[in-house]
Image: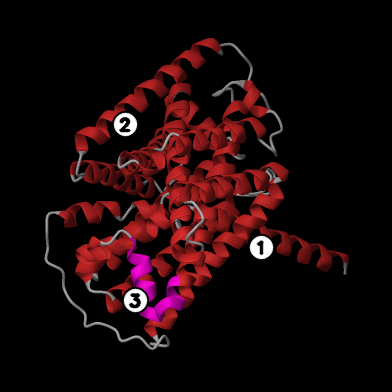
């Protein structure tokens, strides 16, 4: 009996870790920005975009596979930092995670909370100021993460669960015509030069699954659970995006989908009228909370892990299960960015896109590190596929951007500044033992 009870307890703990990790893996994928990109892309390319989306999901599955290999060789939250440092040097291990995750957290949370403020004002309480609600939401998420890791992960599960089930229910209502709204005839969009750009952007909705590494305590999330949760998270998001793309194209003219800045809201209203609009408002608020929350606690724990590896200063390692200083740094940075009016700046979208591009480059660097250290075993083709997909997506997005010069200028500034800081810290900490 004791053995059976022990087995049940072990299975229950493994399932909890799996669902918790999946909620973290899907947090950024189900952000409001992903829904905008999905709707606009379907309007630009039409139904073929859904199949391109599935190919993009396949490319990210190769990256998830590489991360699984990485964490088997380098376990723990600092595994990625140790792998990059051993393969490509400490400066590289500093630059790419900071340029991707930390920079995207600052700009991305600002944009996401601005969207949440707009949604709350337009859908629920018109007299409530947009920016005021954004600050209220930032404070709420900060307090959740400040109180405990467990509370932030429970909240993450609720946010992602509500987003996923809410969007799935709307899609099913639309596909079964339960909302009493007539659907449109399928149409084909006129192919334009933006199609190539849209195809490249298809990689972006799946970025961020690797933050699942920071779910749970370091010694409870095994590499196998991490790999399973990230792959299932990617497949779950791909399934949901596929259904929502189908119903969007069915209920809204493609030209309308490609032009609007709120294609998800237009689709929800077409499916279910005012009720659909309000329900989509709830989904978007949950989505904004889930994406912002995962960036807050995932990036703050990444910074702590990098501090433990001496890739960042040691004071970032204080209270590893409640990384207070990195959390304060992120929240203060987002609050300052919103306070300076960046939330309404047209340049913010470009900076967010720069963060996603750095994240794709970080994936490429991980694949390259695995190949260089030769830890992939007989599965060498999978990291190669992931490396080529990440680099191709980066080149395609930059080459087809509306303002490639502006995008590359800011990416160069960020990269040079981060490289200088990484090189400087690497020189200062030479000879210092790593904290274990």
Give the number of the disc on residue 320: none
Q: Are marks 3 and 1 in contact (CB under 8 Å)?
A: no
SS category of the residue bearing label 1 = helix
Give the number of the disc on residue 15: 1
Q: Is residue 61 magenta?
A: no
Label 2 neighbourhood size at 10 Å, few (<14), some (14-19), many (20+)?
Answer: some
Residue 426 x/y as whole percent = 50, 16
Residue 222 x/y as whole percent = 63, 49
Q: How many marks?
A: 3
Which residue is painted at 23% across and 68% down in the image? Answer: 256
How would you classify the magenta stretch by its main secondary structure? helix
- Identify the magenta region: 262-277
SS category of the residue bearing label 3 = helix
Residue 335 x/y as whole percent = 52, 37
Q: Work out whether mark 2 precedes mark 3 in sequence or the reverse, and give the earlier one.
A: 3
- In front here: 304 or 264? 264
Is residue 49 among what the camera can see? Answer: yes
- In front here: 291 or 427? 291
* Furthest residue in direction front, as rendered: 127
């Amino acid at each position: 009996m004791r053995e059976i009870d022990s087995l049940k307890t072990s299975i229950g703990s493994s399932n909890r870790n799996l669902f918790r990790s999946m909620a973290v893996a899907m947090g950024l994928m189900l952000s409001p920005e992903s829904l905008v990109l999905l709707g606009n892309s379907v309007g630009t390319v039409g139904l073929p975009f859904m199949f391109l989306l599935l190919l993009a999901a396949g490319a990210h599955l190769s990256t998830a596979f590489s991360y699984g290999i990485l964490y088997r060789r380098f376990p723990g939250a600092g595994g990625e930092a140790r792998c990059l440092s051993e393969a490509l040097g400490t400066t590289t291990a500093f630059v790419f995670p900071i340029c991707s995750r930390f920079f995207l957290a600052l700009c991305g949370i600002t944009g996401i909370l601005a969207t949440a403020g707009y949604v709350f004002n337009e859908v629920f309480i018109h007299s409530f100021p947009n920016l005021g609600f954004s600050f209220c939401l930032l404070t709420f998420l900060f307090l959740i993460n400040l109180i405990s890791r467990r509370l932030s992960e429970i909240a993450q599960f609720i946010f992602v669960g509500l987003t996923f089930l809410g969007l799935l229910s709307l899609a099913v209502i639309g596909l079964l015509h339960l909302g009493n709204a007539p659907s449109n005839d399928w149409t084909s969009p006129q192919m334009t030069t933006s199609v190539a750009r849209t195809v490249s952007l298809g990689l972006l909705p799946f970025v961020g699954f690797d933050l699942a590494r920071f779910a749970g305590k370091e010694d409870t999330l095994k590499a196998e659970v991490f790999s399973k949760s990230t792959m299932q998270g990617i497949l779950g998001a791909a399934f949901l995006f596929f259904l929502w793309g189908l119903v969007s194209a069915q209920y809204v003219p493609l030209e309308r989908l490609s032009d609007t800045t709120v294609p998800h809201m237009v689709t929800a209203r077409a499916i279910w009228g005012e009720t659909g609009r309000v329900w989509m408002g709830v989904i978007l608020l949950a989505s904004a909370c889930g994406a912002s929350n995962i960036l807050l606690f995932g990036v703050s724990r990444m910074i702590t892990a990098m501090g433990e590896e001496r890739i960042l200063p040691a004071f970032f390692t204080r209270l590893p299960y409640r990384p207070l200083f990195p959390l304060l740094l992120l929240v203060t940075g987002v609050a300052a960015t919103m306070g300076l009016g960046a939330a309404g700046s047209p340049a913010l979208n470009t900076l967010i896109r720069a963060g996603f591009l750095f994240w794709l480059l970080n994936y490429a660097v991980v694949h390259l590190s695995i190949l260089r250290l030769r830890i992939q075993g007989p599965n060498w083709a999978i990291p190669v596929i992931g490396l080529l997909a990440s680099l191709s997506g980066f080149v395609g997005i930059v080459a087809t951007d509306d303002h490639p010069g502006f995008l590359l200028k800011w990416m160069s500034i960020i990269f040079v500044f981060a490289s200088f800081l990484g090189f400087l810290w690497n020189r200062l900490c030479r000879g210092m033992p790593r904290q274990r």
